[in-house]
Image (cartoon, rainbow, N blue to C red):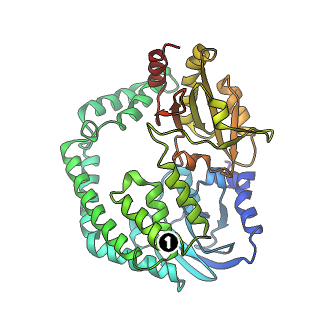
Amino acid sequence: MINITKLLLATAAALSFLNAEAECADSIVCHITGTVVDRPESKLALLMEYGTDMRVTGAKGIDIVDGKFSYDLKTDVPRQYEIIFDDEERSGGWRIKSFFVDNGDVELTYYNDELADSNRVVSSLPDNIVAARWKKMCDDACGSTMKRLIAEMDSLYNRGKAYSEPLKELMSRYEAAKNGTVQKDSLREEIIGFFQKDEKLVYTPEVLAIRARQREMQTVADSLTLDMISREPTLFGLSKIKSVIRQKSDRNNIDGYIDAFNTVYRESFAEHPYTAEILMALDALAVKKGNRYPNFTVTRPDGSTERIAELIKDKIAVIDLWASWCGPCRRHSIALIPIYEQYRDRGFTVVAIAREAANCDAMNEAMKKDGYPWESFVDLNDKGNIWKMNDAGNAGGRIILVGSDGIIVETDATPESIDKYLKEQRL
């Protein structure tokens, strides 16, 4: 049997991780050692910068031998990294295990899922010490309550008492449908759409009560975190700000983090790449209904470039952020085809931008298989950071509808809403 993870890491996408190390000037070298406890299926430790997507930026696969692994990581500046394991990657689920690197040593210990709370980072590097102090602070304030709430939530899921009756009925129909049928695909999309509705339509009252308590605990943790990181600038604090702003829908006090960045971090870490990422994330907050769509450069597979503003000038446009490896993206793009064919000669266009790794081979194959009638631009290895620029996250892509005046009509458009808008515009 082919080891999918090893195959992934053997591709050119994985080489981007190694190339980044090779290009480091005045490199920092961090000696990383790890112990894996009671994880017999874990054969590789996959090392990547925290918050990146290994499908695009690659990862370094480190062999685990007799429960041990080690690696000397080179980087240009201190950064935050994370490790997942090959068996987790294959299953598609894992807990975040992150740490900070600088000149020095980091000793990691990872347990199986049941004992994951015992995972630990032993390091004298300053930001790992700060991270440990932050974790203890939040655990002392909220940890026992959050564990109890998680246990109560798990119990509701295990007893089939988490989802509303309409959603459960929809899921039952999906399970009963035959694989590979249009009906099953349609039901899958309907379920995905269900989770985008008001949570009162998705969950039972018992789950809603637990989620409300979890949000309360998150507010407490946010308040403690903001107070801590605002006292003095640290890389831990900068990384926390970056994560919160990029995952703004999961946080309550984003304005507080933005204020901390501007007053405490922006000048102190002016040259750090995380500062540039935060500034980009702040710009991405403006990609919302009613604002002008930003103008940036996109690149064709042959290297030629265009400015978005010129491509969509005086046209109703869909900005289709997709990737060959993203199933939902491709299903959404396929659904756009009949709309494009109907309106392409009447002032409507699609600007597709693929997020790909290393080369355009997979993109070209996907375009041929799916039958896209438009050209696609490409962002290789996130060089242009176009998904981040458009606040698209790391999964699912994004379809943005822009009016002929350049103003954003909808940021997460569906084929149905696009078709409705075009009819309203009488194209």
Residue 200 is situated, as x and y percent measured from the top left of the image, at 24, 39
- Does residue 73 appear in the picture of this structure? yes
* Residue ID at (49%, 55%): 282
Residue 133 image position (x, y, % from top left): 40, 80
Q: Furthest residue to the bottom?
A: 124
Q: Where on the picture, by quarter, is residue 174? A: top left
Q: Nearer the viewer, residue 420 or 152?
A: 420
The image shows residue 98, relative to residue 8, as above or below, that is below
Disc 1 residue type?
Tyr
Report the residue at 45% width, 76% height from top: 131
The answer to which image quadrant residue 49 occupies is bottom right
Please state the horizontal and vertical placement of residue 333, each as a whole percent of the image: 57, 29
Is 204 left or right of 249, judged from the image as shown? left
Q: Is residue 177 above or below residue 276?
A: above
Position in image of residue 252 (x %, y %): 33, 57
Is residue 104 shown left or right of residue 228? right
Front-most of residues 284 and 145: 284
Q: What is the crowding at mark 1: few (fewer than 14 residues within 10 Å), some, or many (at least 20)?
A: many
- Residue 375's place in the image compared with 27, above or below, is above
Q: Secondary structure at mark 1?
A: helix
Q: Horizontally, is 27 left or right of 179 in the view?
A: right
Front-most of 162 and 314? 314
Query: Which residue lies under the disc numbered 1?
Result: 265
Image label count: 1
Residue 178 showing in the rendered view: no
Residue at image point 57% right, 28% down: 317
- At horizontal 49% and vertical 72% (from top left) the residue drawn is 265
Q: Nearer the viewer, residue 194 or 43?
A: 194
Farthest residue, direction right: 302
